Amino acid sequence: ETGVTQTPRHLVMGMTNKKSLKCEQHLGHNAMYWYKQSAKKPLELMFVYSLEERVENNSVPSRFSPECPNSSHLFLHLHTLQPEDSALYLCASSYTGGEQFFGPGTRLTVL
Amino acid sequence: AQSVTQLDSQVPVFEEAPVELRCNYSSSVSVYLFWYVQYPNQGLQLLLKYLSGSTLVKGINGFEAEFNKSQTSFHLRKPSVHISDTAEYFCAVSPQANNAGNMLTFGGGTRLMVKP
C-alpha cells in the first residue's frame, strides 16, 4: 500500500451504534488530520495531530473521538451520531508545515 | 483567521476551451495558497501551490495559477480543458507561521463540468 489509505470506504450506522474509522499513511509523515466534507459546505478541519499529540480541535462534538497511537495510524471513534453527521470523512497526512496528502475518504451514512 | 471564497459553484465549459476558476482569500497574516482537485469518489489531490517567489505557479495536468497579493486572489487557469478535467476544485490557504502542521482553510469548491 502506498500513500494514505482509509477503511472502510463506506459505512452505514444507526444512531446508537459505535464504530471507528481508520486511516493509515505510508509516507513517513509526522502530522495527520481528520476533515469532514458535507454537501453544500466547505471542507471542515476536525482534528490535527502532530508528532502524535493533538494540536487542534475545531470545536468538534464529543461524539467524535480521535485516537493517534503512532505517527502512521489515526482513528476516528464514532458513537451516538446524528443524521446530520452523514458526510465524507477525509484523512490527510503531512510533514510538519508541509503539504497535505489525502486519503480517498470514508462515506458515512447515519440512519 | 483566514477565509476563502470561490465565487463560482459550477463552471460549465466546452472541451478544448480555456477556463478560469476564481479564488479570493482574506487573512490578517501572510499565507501559502493551494489548489486541490477531487475526482468523483476520491480524496483530494494537490494541483499546485504558491509558497514564495514567482507569482505564476505551474501545476500538474496543464493547470497554472497566479497569486495577486493586492487583489488577494489566486485564480486557477487552463488554456484548453479535457473531458477528464471534470471534477471539483478547491482553493485553500494556510498561515505561513505554523509549526504544527499545515492548517488549511478551504473554499466551498467549484465544480468544473467539461462538455464535448
Image: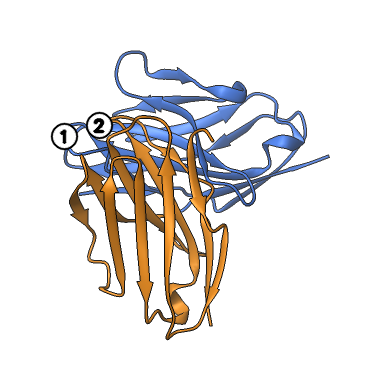
Chain colours: A orange, B blue
Q: Are marks 2 and 1 on the same chain?
A: no
**Element under disc 1:** loop
Where is residue A75? Give x, y as percent: 36, 56
Left or right: A44 as drawn, with respect to B60:
left
Q: Amino acid at mark 1?
A: Asn
The residue lying furthest to the front in this view is A69
The residue lying at 24 percent from left, 60 percent from top is: A58
Question: What residue appears at the point 37 percent right and 82 percent down from the top-left corner?
Answer: A80
* Mark 2 in CB contact with mark 1 (< 8 angstroms): yes
Residue A73 vs residue A34, the one in the foreground:
A73
Give the labeled residue for mark 2: A97
Relative to A79, say whether B26 is above or below: above
For disc 1, the neighbor class at 10 Å (few under 14, some 14 to 19, many from 20) is few
Q: Quadrant of residue A28?
A: top left
Q: Tell me where residue A50 appears, x and y as whole percent.
A: 22, 42
In the image, is residue B68 above or below residue B29?
A: above
- Which residue sits furthest right? B116
- Is residue B54 in view from this perspective? yes
- What residue is shown at x 41% (from left), y 65% (from top)? A20
Q: What is the number of the mark on residue B85? A: none
Q: Secondary structure at mark 2?
A: loop
Asked whether A18 or A34 is in front, the reply is A18
The chain under label 1 reads B
Task: Using the image, name the chain to which the residue with label 2 belongs.
Answer: A
Left or right of A106? Residue B99 is left
In this figure, which residue is indicated by the disc labeled 1?
B99
Q: Nearer the viewer, residue B5 or A53?
A: A53
User: Quick one: quadrant of the C terminus of chain B?
Assistant: top right
Q: Where is residue B11 shown, x and y percent of the image?
A: 63, 46
> Type of residue at label 2?
Gly
Image coordinates of residue B63 in percent, x first then y, are: 57, 25
Query: Toward the viewer: B54 or A39?
Result: A39
